[in-house]
Amino acid sequence: QVQLVESGGGLVQPGGSLRLSCVASGSTSNIGSMSWFRQRPGLEREWVAVVRDNNARYADSVLGRFTITRDNAQNTLHLQMRSLKPDDTAVYYCRVTYTTSGREFHSWGQGTQVTVSS
């Protein structure tokens, strides 16, 4: 299994920046892709970005403002968020996909709150 702990959330003004981190522990050698999701107030959880084998993809809503990076040596995933908008207010979750005994599993972190407000 893989355990995840996120950090870095907080309150930021519109136009500001935040960097989220997610540290993985456990069976980290089996990790494939690493992703960020978010759940905005009153909405379903949505995908934000994914990185696998140094290839990153982003949701249209964050493209050009957010950067996902993965530090394999530290088993850490980051999300650098810039030009934040009030609409980015959400609980942000990291998720990893890993393989054990030929089966694919997902692990989720506990979430970190990001609030964009003046």
Image: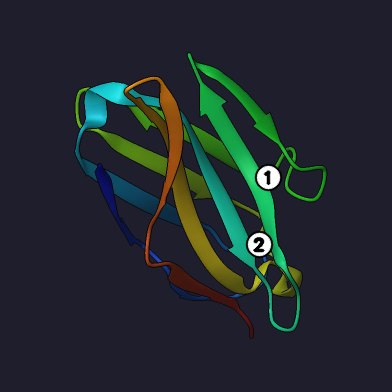
Question: Cα distance, mark 2 to mark 1?
Answer: 8 Å
Q: Which image quadrant for residue 26?
A: top left
> Residue 114 location, x and y as percent?
52, 72
Work out whether residue 72 can be spotted.
no
User: Badge 2 is on which residue?
Assistant: 84
Classify mark 1: helix, strand or loop. loop
In this picture, residue 25 sits left or right of residue 22: left
Taking 77 as reference, is 67 left or right? right
The structure residue drawn at horizontal position 59% and vertical position 75%, both measured from the top left corner, is 13
The residue sitting at 21% across, 32% down in the picture is 27
Q: Which residue corresponds to mark 1?
A: 65
Work out whether residue 100 can be spotted: yes
Nearer to us in this view, 24 or 57: 24
N-terminal of the pair, mark 2 or mark 1, is 1
Q: Amino acid at mark 1?
A: Arg
Question: Would residue 39 appear left or right of 51 to someone viewing this image?
Answer: right
Q: In the picture shown, does residue 75 fall above or below 88?
A: above
Return the x and y of residue 20 as percentages of the image width and height: 41, 54
The N terminus sits in image quarter:
top left
